[in-house]
C-alpha cells in the first residue's frame, strides 16, 4: 500500500465521528418529522423536515430513500412509545378494574397517536406501509381486550364486537374531536358504556 493511500484512509476516530454525525443527523430528521406532524401538519414536505432538523435537503434523502421511508421510521418510533404505554402488566386483580386500566392506558396512547393517524389518513394513498402499520396496532389492542375479558363475554360476538369498537381509537377520536370532550370526559363516557354492556 502506498504512503498516499495510507495517509488518505481515515483513522478509526475519524470514521467513528462520521458515523456518529450521520446517526445524529438521522435522529434529528426523524425527530423533526415527529414534531411537525405532532403540531398538526398532516403531510410535511422534505424541505420542511430539513429546515426543522437544520440539515440540507440532500442529507434527508441520504438517510431516507423517499418520504414513505421517513414515515416508516416515524411510525416505528411512535409504536415504541405506544408499546411502552400499553404493554406493561396490568396491576388490578378483578377483570373490571383491569378493563378500567386498559381504558386509562388507551386514552394516553390514543391522544399521542391522534395527529399521526390524521397524517396516515392523508398520506395512505401514497404509502403501502401506513395502512398495514395501523392494522397491526388494531390486532394488538383486540388481543389485549380478549385476554382481559371473561370468556363468556368474548364468546358473545355482539357484545365483544361492541366493546372492541367502544375501546378503539376511532371511538376515542370521535369523542375528543367531533364531540369536543376533554380526556377525562371521554374516558368517563367509554367506561360508562363498557360497564353497561358488561353488566
Image (cartoon, rainbow, N blue to C red):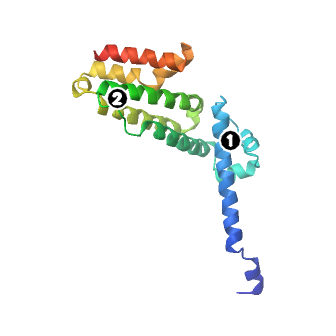
Q: Residue at x 50, y 43 (%)?
A: 80
- Do the residues bearing badges 1 and 2 touch, measured as CB atoms within 8 Å? no
| Count of residue discs | 2
| Residue 175 at x, y percent in the picture | 50, 16
Residue corresponding to mark 2 = 98
Along the line of sight, which residue is nearer the eye, 97 or 159? 97
| Residue 49 at x, y percent in the picture | 71, 41
Closest to the camera, between mark 1 and mark 2, is: 2
Residue corresponding to mark 1 = 32
| Lateral position of residue 45 relative to residue 110, left or right | right
Figure quadrant of the C terminus: top left
| Lateral position of residue 65 relative to residue 101, left or right | right
- Around disc 1, counting alpha carbons within 10 Å, would you say few (fewer than 14), some (14 to 19), or many (20 or more)? many
Q: Residue furthest bottom?
A: 2
Q: Residue at x 54, y 12 (%)?
A: 179
| Quadrant of the image occupied by residue 119 | top right
| Residue 173 at x, y percent in the picture | 52, 21
Along the line of sight, which residue is nearer the eye, 77 or 48? 77
Mark 2 element type? helix
Amino acid at each position: 500500500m502506498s504512503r498516499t493511500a495510507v495517509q488518505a484512509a481515515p483513522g478509526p476516530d475519524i470514521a467513528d465521528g462520521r458515523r456518529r454525525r450521520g446517526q445524529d443527523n438521522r435522529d434529528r430528521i426523524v425527530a423533526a418529522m415527529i414534531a411537525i406532524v405532532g403540531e398538526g401538519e398532516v403531510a410535511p414536505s422534505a424541505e420542511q423536515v430539513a429546515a426543522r432538523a437544520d440539515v440540507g435537503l440532500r442529507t434527508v434523502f441520504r438517510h431516507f430513500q423517499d418520504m414513505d421511508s421517513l414515515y416508516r421510521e416515524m411510525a416505528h418510533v411512535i409504536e415504541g412509545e405506544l408499546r411502552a404505554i400499553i404493554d406493561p402488566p396490568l396491576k388490578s386483580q378483578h377483570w373490571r378494574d383491569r378493563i378500567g386500566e386498559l381504558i386509562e392506558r388507551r386514552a394516553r396512547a390514543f391522544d399521542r397517536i391522534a395527529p399521526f393517524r390524521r397524517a396516515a389518513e392523508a398520506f395512505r394513498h401514497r404509502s403501502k406501509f401506513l395502512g398495514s402499520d395501523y392494522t397491526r396496532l388494531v390486532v394488538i389492542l383486540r388481543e389485549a381486550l380478549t385476554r382481559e375479558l371473561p370468556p363468556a363475554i368474548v364468546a358473545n360476538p355482539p357484545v365483544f364486537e361492541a366493546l372492541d369498537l367502544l375501546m378503539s381509537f376511532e371511538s376515542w377520536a370521535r369523542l375528543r374531536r367531533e364531540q369536543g370532550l376533554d380526556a377525562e370526559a371521554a374516558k368517563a363516557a367509554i367506561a360508562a358504556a363498557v360497564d353497561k354492556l358488561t353488566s
